């Protein structure tokens, strides 16, 4: 009888743990700092949507490299070549530095990304366009860095030394191994599986695309999201999940009766 009770408790713990944990959607954004579409996406969709409760449903990875290329992987003589020119390379360096230096690159508590980094990126994108000068870009670094989070001078120094360059090479390698050269900026990937239709869909309506990936129960923020009519392999995973939960409950109840 103690044996059954033990199994009962273990299974109960398992079910409770499964119900408590939110399954986050992995979202990877490949972008470059001055691309108008990436800026529009970040400013008008990604950033505002992640201000609310939906932020708890996402693991976000921002990869600032885009269509750039480089002449060498040795930082002493590397030179980056960016689609919108040298200011874009500077913006990529600065955003890579922001990602890696703010809170030592760790996520904000309870979130699957760093909120301070996302704040910085959004502010920089608002302030720096493909018409900006280097001086204006440097002014934006000052305007967008909050002293309590990171100083502008640390970011600027990083963008001008080995640390920043090495990290941008790293983002370059990640991008190259995904697609070389990157075809669309931004490219938005869900759960590590690239689907062009989803990436384009996310640019148009990130809320709808994200909510379609969130496993039930969905947060109420998804109530207003457009329902996407797209064939998805996820539904079979969902029903498998439900069936396995049902089986666990069933076993539990059975064991409880047997043990008493
Ligand atoms: C920005 O994106 C929205 C969709 O979120 C789109 O309706 C709008 O036309 C875009 N603006 C520009 C300037 O591309
Ligand atoms: C966020 O979600 C929690 C429960 O998940 C809810 O109590 C709260 O009202 C929500 N907040 C907003 C701003 O929707
Ligand atoms: C490197 O990138 C620049 C800017 O996107 C592009 O014009 C150039 O063709 C690229 N060179 C190579 C070798 O891919
Ligand atoms: C530049 O960033 C600041 C700080 O976020 C913001 O208040 C301001 O509106 C931005 N400027 C532009 C032109 O968007
Ligand atoms: C770093 O700063 C020096 C001096 O201002 C400048 O000549 C050099 O081009 C900068 N290097 C990079 C990678 O920005
Ligand atoms: C999301 O990414 C994490 C870490 O890479 C991984 O363990 C997890 O399985 C991914 N989730 C999905 C749904 O792909």
Image (cartoon, rainbow, N blue to C red):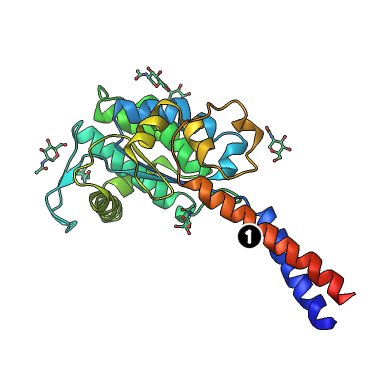
Q: Is residue 133 left or right of residue 106?
A: left
Q: Eyeballing the image, is 253 above or below 228?
A: below
Give x and y (percent) for residue 70: 15, 48
Name which quarter of the figure residue 38 lies in: top left
Residue at the image position 16 percent from the left and 57 percent from the top: 76
Q: Is residue 108 visible?
A: no
Categorize mark 1 by other alpha carbons within 10 Å: few (<14), some (14-19), many (20+): few
The C terminus - image quarter: bottom right
Give x and y (percent) for residue 54: 58, 38
Q: Eyeballing the image, is 231 above or below 20?
A: above
Q: How many marks can you see? A: 1
Residue at the image position 22 percent from the left and 37 percent from the top: 183
Q: Is residue 132 left or right of residue 224?
A: left
Q: Is mark 1 within 8 Å of ligand 6?
A: no
In this view, the residue in front, 255 or 18, is 255
Name which quarter of the figure residue 18 lies in: bottom right
Give x and y (percent) for residue 98: 40, 45
In this view, the residue in front, 138 or 71, is 71
Residue at the image position 19 percent from the left and 46 percent from the top: 180
The N terminus - image quarter: bottom right
Give x and y (percent) for residue 176: 23, 50
Q: Disc 1 designates what residue?
A: 244
Q: Is residue 76 visible?
A: yes
- Which quadrant contains ligand 1? top left
Disc 1 is placed on an element classified as: helix
Q: Is residue 156 left or right of residue 88?
A: right
Residue projecting furthest to the right: 260
Q: Is residue 154 left or right of residue 161?
A: right
């Amino acid at each position: 009888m103690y044996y059954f009770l033990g199994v009962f408790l273990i299974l109960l713990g398992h079910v409770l743990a499964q119900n408590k944990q939110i399954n986050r959607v992995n979202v990877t954004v490949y972008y470059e700092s001055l691309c108008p579409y990436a800026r529009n996406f970040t400013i008008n969709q990604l950033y505002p949507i992640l201000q609310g409760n939906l932020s708890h449903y996402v693991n976000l990875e921002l990869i600032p490299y885009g269509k750039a290329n480089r002449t060498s992987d040795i930082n002493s003589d590397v030179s980056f070549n960016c689609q919108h020119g040298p200011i874009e390379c500077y913006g990529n360096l600065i955003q890579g530095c922001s990602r890696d230096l703010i809170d030592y690159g760790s996520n904000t508590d309870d979130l699957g990304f760093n909120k301070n980094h996302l704040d910085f990126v959004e502010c920089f994108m608002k302030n720096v366009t493909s018409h900006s000068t280097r001086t204006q870009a440097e002014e934006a670094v000052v305007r967008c860095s909050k002293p309590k989070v990171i100083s502008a001078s640390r970011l600027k120094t990083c963008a001008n030394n080995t640390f920043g360059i090495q990290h941008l090479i790293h983002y370059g390698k990640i991008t190259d191994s995904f697609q070389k050269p990157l075809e669309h900026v931004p490219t938005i990937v869900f759960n590590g599986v690239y689907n062009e239709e989803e990436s384009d869909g996310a640019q148009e309506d990130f809320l709808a695309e994200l909510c379609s990936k969130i496993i039930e129960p969905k947060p109420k923020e998804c109530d207003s999201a457009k329902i996407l009519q797209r064939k998805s392999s996820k539904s079979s995973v969902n029903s498998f999940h439900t069936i396995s939960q049902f089986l666990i409950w069933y076993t539990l109840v059975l064991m409880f009766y047997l043990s008493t």
